Amino acid sequence: MASGSEREVIIRVADLKAAYDGQVVLDHINFEVYAGEVLAILGGSGSGKSTLLKHMIGLYQPAAGKVLIDGEDIAAASGAARLKILRKFGVMYQSGALFGSMTLVENVALPLEEFTDLPPEAIRLIALMKLERVGLSGVADRMPSELSGGMQKRGAIARAMALDPRMLFLDELSAGLDPVTSAELDQLVLSLARSLKITFIVVTHELPSIFTIADRVIMLDKQEKGIVAVGSPQELRDHSDDPRVHQFFFRQASSEN
Amino acid sequence: MASSPYTGVDLRSEGPSEGVLKLIIAGRLDSSTTGGIWRRASTAVNGAHVANVLIDATGIEYCDGAGIALLVHLRRLQNKANGDLRIDGLRPEFADLLDDGVARVVDVTRETARQGIAEEIGQATVEVWRDIQILVSFVGELGAGLAYAALHPQSVRWRDALHVAEAAGVNALPIVALVSFLMGLIMAFQAAVPLRQFGAQLFIANLIGLSMLRELGPLMTAIILAGRSGSAFAAELGTMKVREEIDALKTMGLDPVRFLIVTRVVAAVCMTPLLTIFADLVGLIGGAVVMLSLGFPLITYFHQIQYAVSYGSLVGGLVKSFAFGILVAGIGCQRGLQTKSGAASVGESTTSAVVSGIILIALTDGVFSVVYYYLGV
């Protein structure tokens, strides 16, 4: 790990521009993610949170600029080099995206089967251990459709962790979940960050969740097409004089529209 | 960390001496390296039959979930043999992972409940019976929906029906044309050789006219409809079911049968006879190409067809295609509504829609043949 003084930069987003069919959604995005931190990407609906996330994980090609993961440009890489970058992170999608035709444990085992030479018994053991970590080893042989929304998200986190990535991207961690389940997921993220030193990049707009888990947040804005604030959530809530940040943290309706 | 000097893992065993087997593991124990030593380590522990196993982990530089799993696995193997396993020198950050409660996973083996053959037959029978019940109730609902639509034509969403008609009918014209043209052409061509021996090539016209209008036109059209539109209905309604759109309709007080299925069935039923007429015509044209090449003038061909084929044959074929249209569209929609959840289930519904559609077409065709025989059509 980074020894002491300077914090290790694990992801660097440099002058990123994102556009759909020529329509610019985000422009001049610059920020870093440090190893071991929980970074939350905030913003209202349509501010480009998910777009930014999908650029960071290499699903979309940036219109300009780049995303460096561990110093390597994900959009420019292809073949084995790209695979190597992809192995460094796991992604949990908004609705879990567990494969409906496989049981929960098979979902978690899939990356292990495809990318390692471990024997079957080892794969099942590892998959069960991942599920135990998210509290789901009891339902390992169920199909995803038999699980509740919160369980599906936890299962998706277990699948994302299958190959022990250093970074986890979570898209809308607590959207559509009850406060108790949502709090449980927050605790899960904290414990993973603490015990496994996993770096988290979380897209969310749930205030309680932001204050519980995030070390640092970056806030996007629709009009600005970019970042309007960076800092710890407490700092932004108490000291920001930007009205957009204020509105977000105090749940005030926007006066403009 | 990413640039560790040594990226492999090393396993050595010492002993067993004085009842202790010593395993020395060194290097990076991660998901890409653990597989290489898993079997060897397991066999070493299993084969030693000693009371005490000592794992010297001092040399482990990095250990992830896979590595921890190996240690847990070895401990479990040793415990099963009533032995003891100690891990020495594991760095505290990795030891934390081992003690983190992750190792509590109890049952590794999958409970595979093998079914007996009797149980399987029983279950299959129950499923077939349930399927029949669902079909019967669906036929009832659809009948009621169609009757209501007939009595209240303004309740049908005609705009949707037109869209479906375009997709299922107009857009099917090229493939229907291709298949029927080739069928007419090939049949005529195949028949030309044996009929020449008897100097009866003129009767190719009878063959093409009768078989296209009475049988092949309606049948091929229906099968194309099942493949193109029955499957599309099932996939669309299935996805709607999975995305809870069907539930949304229900809670809005809109009956999915009336709202979605009646429009589709009405559209398909209107389109099938039209497509069949088109298929008949193109099939005859295919035959005409062969007849022309054999030296018969077009007028002779058409006179011969008029002489051979009655209006009864044409209408009989159209009535049949009308029935096929209801069946294919109905079963497609029904299979779609029956979708459970998930992407795989949509696939199953779609397959089932096409298979059931074709089975129903074949059965109904047989029934019509018998009925037409007795009616003398």
Image (tube, rainbow, N blue to C red):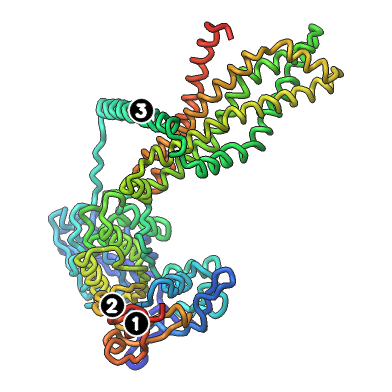
Mark drawn on residue B140: 3
Disc 1 or 2, which lies upstream in sequence?
2
Regarding mark 1 in the picture, which secondary structure is present there? strand
Tell which residue pokes out farthest to the left in this image.
B82
Regarding mark 3 in the picture, which secondary structure is present there? helix
Q: Quadrant of the C terminus of chain A?
A: bottom left
Q: State yes or no: discs 3 and 1 in contact (Cβ < 8 Å).
A: no
Asked if marks 3 and 1 fall on the same chain, the answer is no
Mark drawn on residue A210: 2
The CA distance from mark 3 to mark 1 is 58 Å
Horizontal side of B336 relative to A187 (left or right) equals: right
**Amino acid type, residue under disc 2 in the picture:** Ile
Q: State yes or no: discs 1 and 2 in contact (Cβ < 8 Å).
A: yes
Asked if marks 1 and 2 fall on the same chain, the answer is yes
Residue at the image position 62 percent from the left and 13 percent from the top: B312
**Amino acid type, residue under disc 3 in the picture:** Gly
Front in this rendered view, residue B365 or A199: B365
Crowding at dot 2, Cα within 10 Å, few <14 / some 14-19 / many 20+, comes out as many
Residue at the image position 38 percent from the left and 28 percent from the top: B139
Reading the image, the residue beneath label 1 is: A217
